[in-house]
Image (cartoon, grey):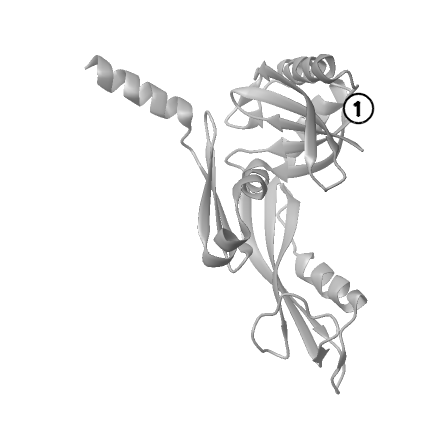
Amino acid sequence: MTLAAIDVGSHKICTLVGEQTDDGGIRVLGVGHASSEGIRNGEIVHVGDAAAAIINSVKRSERSSGIPVRRARVGISGLHLRGFTNRGLLPCGRHPRSIVQLDVDRVLETAGAVPLEPDREIVHVLTQHFTIDGGAPVESPISMEACRLEASVFIATASASAISNLRKCLTLAEVTPVGLAASVLAAAEAVLTPDERRLGVFVLDLGAATSCLACYADDALIHLQPLPVGGSHMTTDLGLNLQA
């Protein structure tokens, strides 16, 4: 199975092409990157330039891998990312009964159904934990007896206009996005161990113009915070101090 991903940053756009291995891993087949044009602080400021940069990155990955890229998962970043926790409740009846997968799906749907401002769009709805009848958090409530099922989720949102402009650039590049992902969460998936997630850890995704901080505890994402500081700021500060 062939997979493709595009990370849209303020300094460069990187496209990776890979295939899934028999053991569930990913074998990278090709990489392409291009300087970001028309992108500032993780957001599109010029559709034509940004689309051209995406096209250059995609073409280089196609030459490297020999595989055409028509669909890809796209990583996003920027100061417009936000996150918050929400809860959902599902009554199961007056008497305890066994929780089934349909109950889990319904309570997660309830927890993820939140009113948003018109300029916001949901990017992720990530499960934190479940509780049954107000008890201690549980990882999986399936087959447990309960009268009431609750779910706590972390919802990551992004600017609707920023996502719309990104989709327009991808359309011009003739790439269909199969999903969007906050880059910091993709980085966390790549570097964190199960013990780190359980004990508590911060992940800092350091970009050129912006960075993003994610906090994990008890094996769940609990906080997401973009920062208006990136590697270019540090480089500039170092240059100014070394010249002094």
The structure residue drawn at horizontal position 35% and vertical position 20%, both measured from the top left corner, is 235
Q: Which residue does the numbered mark 1 point to in the structure image?
A: 70
228 in relation to 202, above or below? above
The structure residue drawn at horizontal position 63% and vertical position 65%, both measured from the top left corner, is 139
110 in relation to 181, above or below? below
Percent position of residue 5, x then y: 68, 29
Q: Quadrant of residue 7?
A: top right
**Closer to the camera, 5 or 190?**
190
The structure residue drawn at horizontal position 54% and vertical position 37%, both measured from the top left corner, is 80
Amino acid type of the residue tagged 1 in the rendering: Arg
Q: Quadrant of residue 20?
A: top right
Pointer 1: residues within 10 angstroms few (<14), some, or many (20+)? Answer: some
**Closer to the camera, 168 or 6?**
6
Q: Quadrant of residue 106?
A: bottom right
Left or right: 102 in relation to 129: right
107 in relation to 217, above or below? below
Percent position of residue 18, x then y: 72, 28
Percent position of residue 236, x then y: 33, 19
The structure residue drawn at horizontal position 74% and vertical position 65%, both measured from the top left corner, is 104
Left or right: 117 in relation to 173: left
Quadrant where the image shows the C terminus: top left
For the residue labelled by badge 1, is the local secondary structure a helix, a strand or a loop?
loop
